[in-house]
Image (cartoon, rainbow, N blue to C red):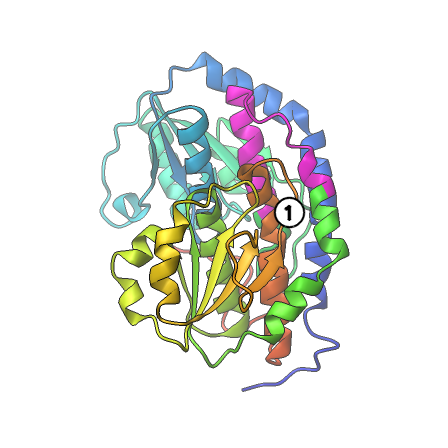
Amino acid sequence: MRKYDVNQIGTIMQNEISEIPSTFTKLIGSDAQFTALSGLLKANEIQSVLVLARGTSDNAAHFLKYLIETQLGLPVGLTSPSSVTIYHAKLHFKKSLVIAISQSGQSTDLVEYATAAKTAGAKVISITNDGKSPLAKLADHHLDLMAGEEIAVAATKTYAAQLLACLLLVNAWSSTLNNFRLVIAAGEKLLADTSSVVRAVARCERSREIVVLGRGFSYPNAREAALKIQETSKISVQGLSIADYMHGPISALTSETQVLIFAPKGMPLNFLKEDLQKIRAKSPKIFWFGSGELALENEVVIDGADCENEIYASVVDSIILQIFALEFARKNGLNPDSPEGLSKVTLTR
């Protein structure tokens, strides 16, 4: 295994994480693109929504799914691009909205599926970091992430921007999430003191199994944390809904397992108590991301965002999962800026 100087590796990823609050500021300031979107949404009788994405963007898609279902009550599905690219299905998408999320906007299967959906009668909104990308050009409306160039292979500021863009999109539709400016100050505060993340990393071992759990609005970040650790530290990590974990995978839990639980501040936690009893019965090492309200003395707490509800806190807590992955890779002598075997743009079919 190749080793790196920990003083030199990860500087690109670190710098890009540090740009998240300024990215939030630019995205919130680009209200014209969301005002124009509002007109498109309200002028069309939309009865269902499908979200099109891969990889990190697929985790943001889960966040958008929760937002639309809770704020608008519309049914939201996650697309299967292979139905078009491999099986050549003929779609029937009248009165449907397809929202395509992609950092680059270049993945062939996403472009193909979005094209087929538009031909089938759907309205298409794209959310990318490149307004000149194929996905952006074919959409009825494009939302620019305003994140600037992202060089590190692991998506950081673009993922955080995707979460906020999803929030702004839904607010343009429903006007129910208008305190979103709080995320800027909350992000700056988290970045000003990362000591709890560093302490947690010191107690987490690459040689032991890692499972990442979340529920509701914290589920996308749990999936993303698992993905980021896999990408940057080259180990297999599970990212699961707590509910799904209790339906079977918990049988593999042992005292050697490290369980990372995402519980953003403002999240209702009563539903967790019974599950926690079953998890703690196996004596794993537990790490809390966000709130430590349910943590025991011997469990590790990583302080999350101070926001009024879990939706805003979940957007900002994307920062702590990224810092954790960065510092964990550094601890293990791996380069999180450019993990072996990965490239910035993945062109799947």
Q: Residue drawn at (75%, 77%), measured in percent from left and top?
A: 7
Residue toward you, 156 or 283 = 283
Q: Main secondary structure of the magenta part?
A: helix
Farthest residue in the right direction? 192
- Range of the magenta residues? 160-185
Residue 267 location, x and y as percent? Answer: 50, 42
Task: Specify whether 277 is left or right of 268.
Answer: left
Residue toward you, 181 or 117 = 181
Q: Quadrant of the N terminus?
A: bottom right
Residue toward you, 132 or 62 = 62
Residue 315 occupies quadrant? top right
Residue 21 location, x and y as percent? Answer: 72, 45
Q: Is residue 129 visible?
A: no
Task: Identify the residue position indicated by label 1 in the image.
Answer: 305
Q: Amino acid at mark 1?
A: Ala
Disc 1 is placed on an element classified as: loop
On whether residue 29 falls in the magenta region, the answer is no
Residue 338 location, x and y as percent? Answer: 60, 69
On whether residue 179 falls in the magenta region, the answer is yes
Q: Is residue 80 above or below residue 328?
A: above
Q: Is residue 162 above or below residue 213?
A: above
Residue 268 location, x and y as percent? Answer: 47, 41
Q: Residue drawn at (46%, 26%), measured in percent from left and top?
A: 71
